[in-house]
Amino acid sequence: MKIVTISREFGSGGRELGKRLADALGVPCYDHEIIEMVAEKCGFDKKYVSHISEKDIRVFYPSTVGNRFMNSPAIQQPVKIVAAQHEIVRQLARQGDCVIVGRCADVLCQDMRPLNMFVYADRLSKLRRCEDRADENEQISEKEIYRRMKQIDKERAAYRKLFTDEKWGRKEFYHLCINTSGKEIKALIPAVAAYVNVWFGIG
């Protein structure tokens, strides 16, 4: 089975790379689709699920958790979402060849022997990508974009710690690290797809 997981820094183009790679390989790509599935399964709004999706759910806990807090929705709902996401990621991977973006899929599916990638870039390249994909009516300063980059990457790293002690972004925990700095994502796809095929002994 050919499963590729993609972890990525915010603004690095990892989501685009995952979609284009899946198209090149002729397999499905799962990203926002996972949020939609979790929302349907749990009966929550998609925006709420997206808000929880790659965060350390411990931040939603009261600072002092006593027995009277354990049954509160503030705790139960994030736990339910993470559990459902965990189950859906593994279910999608078991269905067959695919590319899964984020959601700690590399760790959750490690028994299925996926090819795990980490996509990163320098600060300026990430800034430019964020600016290019921003809504034209959205006025966000460079300072705010950098703040958002740092915060989201921090949340992704914390989310990973829920499942493993392997640090998010450390090269030794991935099979392929891709630096997209100054590169057009679609130009990288033929080489990345060729690497995937060689990795899985195809071609």
Image (cartoon, grey):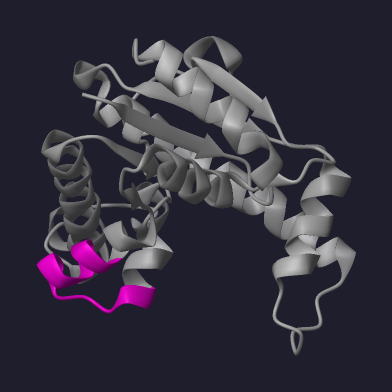
- Of 138 and 82, nearer the camera is 138
- Of 5 and 151, nearer the camera is 5
| Left or right of residue 189: residue 199 | left
Q: Position of residue 140 (x, y in %)?
A: 81, 75
Give the residue displayed 79% in from the left and 41% down from the top.
183
| Left or right of residue 122: residue 17 | left
* Quadrant including the C terminus: top left
Residue 203 in view of the camera: yes
116 up-or-down from 199: above or below: below
Give the quarter of the image for residue 43. bottom left
- The residue at the far front in this view is 203
Give the quarter of the image for residue 172. top right
Give the residue displayed 66% in from the left and 35% down from the top.
188
Disc tally is 0
* Quadrant including the N terminus: top left
| Left or right of residue 81: residue 169 | right
Extent of the magenta region: 36-47
Q: Is residue 77 magenta?
A: no
Residue 168 in view of the camera: no
Q: Position of residue 26 (x, y in %)?
A: 35, 43
20 up-or-down from 169: above or below: below
Q: Is residue 44 magenta?
A: yes
| Left or right of residue 190: residue 131 | right
Q: Position of residue 167 (x, y in %)?
A: 51, 22
Give the residue displayed 17% in from the left and 60% down from the top.
76
Q: Position of residue 145 (x, y in %)?
A: 78, 62
- Of 149 and 116, nearer the camera is 116
Give the residue displayed 87% in from the left and 62% down from the top.
143
Magenta-colored segment: predominant secondary structure:
helix
- Of 50 and 63, nearer the camera is 50
